[in-house]
Amino acid sequence: MEAEAGAGAERQRDGEGDTAPLTETAATRPSGEARKWKRPRDGDTAPLTQAAAAGPSGEAQYSYLPVADALMEAPNALVCLFAVVSEIGATVHSRGTDFTVTLKIVDQSRPSGISVTFFAENTALLPCVRSSGDVISLHNIMISVHHEDSFFKYNKKFSSFALFEGKASTECRPYQHSAKYKYHAGHDNEILTKMRLWLVSHPLGHNDIELQLMSIKSDSAFDLVCKVLHVHEASNGVWILYVWDGTDTPVTEFQMMLDTESVTSPPLHLEEEPLPREVLCTLPCVGSVLRVFTNSFFKEILHFQKGIYWARFCNITCKQEFGMWKGIMLPVCRVRLLSNENGSVVERLKMFDRRIATKVHRWPMASLPNASDITDVMEHKSVGYITLMESLTHAEVIHKFKTLVRVVAAYPCQPNDLSLLVAGRNGMRLTLEDPTARIRAYIHKNDGVIYLCY
DNA sequence: TTGGGG
């Protein structure tokens, strides 16, 4: 007997329910339909009855419930689901002996989603979701109630899973499955296809405001999709995440410091200590690297330490300190890891590629599109511009370069008195910045050449 | 067991 499939609404039990509509939800489901899962008795280590029954061929037939229906089952009941992964948590050590990861899944009956927590002895046994929007099949996961909220818990002894590509694929074989997963081609394929069709008309959306670094604002929460390039544990439990999305942070509203007293030079960085050169050299030279300050509450930090990841920072805020942008992650923030195939990530990378393809990609984005207003130095017109980050990480300590920067502070004269310098006045200290770095530049005139030293 | 978007 071929199993009937619906979008999470399949019920192949004793021949009942062979026309489950795609739109069925917990609310529309006919009442009185018996729930046949039995609960494990207290003290049992394994459930007495699993959410499967032998089919005519003797193979287990898994009865997939809509998520909303599954949640109406009693605590500790075992259910089978076919759903879409909407959010991917970080894989971390549990407080016990296992590794754990939490996924958020959605289906038509529960668009707001619900968490599923997995445990396994090693990370290879955990689901490794390639992209949000992928489809997951879950067999015999347990309903768990905590503070009146329901969740699903994957038990490594009797649960199993399979992961499938999302709506763009026609591949019906799972790209990853647990050892115990019982795959039924006809049965699973039909549900998978319907789930993908549903996804086409109901793409996973984010209602929250999503900004790029080029459009960040002070003191209002937003989502930021960016690459975490480096993580640093500072003092007092403060962690600093170095994030990048290929765009430049906006020009800050910073009162230019007329540096009449040498002690008032503005700081060059937000950190207590600047990044060591070997780390600095790994950071991109085009596009701002925002410093995001947080504490160790965010377990994802452990994940970031192991490599470079794209992530969505939900409800992040920014402020300006000393004319520099500072990201802040409060406990209300959430971090979601993203794959390279995630739509927002692909969009960021395409935008960066477009930027790199222009001749002025090393100019601050804020200086565009009025780049023609900038007067170039005639005798070096053919020399290309570089960013301050490129200069800071240059292989040769002494090098010539041309750069487009903002003068943040000047000592001892006003920055618009650069003509005095050219006219022969020696000794001037400038604080210069572009979207990639801030430097102190000591200018002196020597043999008719102006040097910047830092 | 663990965690369960504090």
Image (spheres, helix red, strand yellow):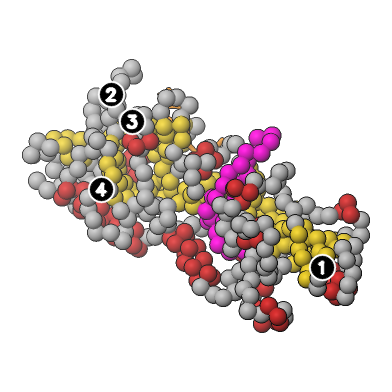
Prevailing secondary structure class for the magenta stretch in the rendered image: strand
Type of the residue with mark 1: Asn
Give the residue drawn at x 20%, y 35%: A52
Q: Which residue is mark 3?
A: A155
- Say if residue A421 shows up in the picture: yes
Label 2 residue SS = loop
A344 lies above or below A46: below
- Report the front residue among A239 and A101: A239
Say which quarter of the image contains residue A128: top left
On whether disc 1 and disc 2 are found on a single subunit, the reply is yes
Q: Which residue is mark 4?
A: A174
- Report the front residue among A385 and A191: A385
Name the side, left or right, on which A70 lies relative to A278: left
Mark sitting earlier along the chain (3/4):
3
Whether residue A365 is in magenta: the answer is no
Give the residue drawn at x 60%, y 47%: A278
- Disc 2 vs disc 3: Cβ atoms closer than 8 Å? no
Name the side, left or right, on which A280 lies relative to A18: right
Q: CA distance from mark 2 to mark 3?
A: 10 Å
Q: Which residue is mark 2?
A: A46
Q: Residues within 10 Å of mark 4 (few under 14, many from 20)?
A: some
Q: CA distance from mark 3 to mark 1?
A: 73 Å
Mark sitting earlier along the chain (1/2):
2
Type of the residue with mark 3: Asn
Give the residue drawn at x 38%, y 36%: A123
Q: CA distance from mark 2 to mark 4?
A: 26 Å
Mark sitting earlier along the chain (3/1):
3
Instruction: Please state the extent of the stretch shown in magenta in the rendering.
Output: A220-248
Q: Residues within 10 Å of mark 2 (few under 14, many from 20)?
A: few
Q: Which residue is mark 1?
A: A446
Which residue appears farthest toward the right when viewing the image? A261
